[in-house]
Amino acid sequence: MSVSNSNIRVTWSSFEFETAVTTARCQLTLEGSYHRGTISKVRGTLIASISRATVKTESCTNARPTTEGLPWHITYEGFRGTLPSMTEVLLLLREARLKLERVIGSSLECRYGVASDNITSAAVLNASRENTNLVPLAGRSTISLLEARNEELFLRCSATGQFIAASNDGLVRLLNSATTLIRVTLI
């Protein structure tokens, strides 16, 4: 496959991180780049990295997440649809780290992201094979607790969390462009 542009931005107006204790909702933007203009359809191939992750903390509800440990790596996982008409390209986000803070009397801090975590998302393609959205896949977007600070009897960190976003959110665009989509072409 080939991609039309290497620099990408993904923006969610309401990205959720859900644990057994709380659900944090925030605006989130990821920026990064593909390593090459062509991608081998080989599962596990490193194809891109996320070099910047911005959480609009003033928009957050229930908790404040912050991102850590950049860059995060993206590998090719597979596709959905039939060739030559793919409908989604499955991507695996590796090495993601997130700190979740809740302030209720005292500040609880939960750090998520262990080496074995793999967060799978679908890069949704339109009829012109342009990547319109990036959507975390239900049941395949779990991240595990790495460290807990300031836990109390009534306020503890959950062992895992899930990433959730609406299917029409997670807009994918060329970096520094509000309208230019990334085209995925079979070669």
Image (cartoon, rainbow, N blue to C red):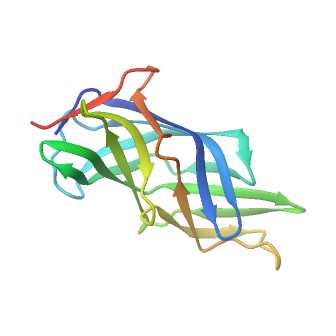
Give the residue displayed 54% in from the left and 62% down from the top.
162
Q: Is residue 57 above or below residue 100?
A: above
The part of the image, by quadrant, that contains residue 173 is: top left
Vertical comparison of 59 with 96: above or below? above
In the rendered structure, the answer to whether residue 154 lies left or right of residue 119 reads right
Q: Quadrant of the N terminus?
A: top left
Closer to the camera, 170 or 43?
170
Q: Residue at x 60, y 52 (%)?
A: 16
Q: Quadrant of residue 22?
A: bottom right
Viewer-nearest residue: 67 or 78: 78
Foreground pick, 71 / 57: 57
Residue 139 point in image, percent of width and height: 45, 66
Rendered location of residue 31, percent (x, y)? 46, 35
Q: Residue at x 90, y 62 (%)?
A: 105
Image height check: is 118 above or below 184?
below
Q: Position of residue 142 (x, y in %)?
A: 49, 65
The residue sitting at the right extreme is: 105
Quadrant where the C terminus sits is top left
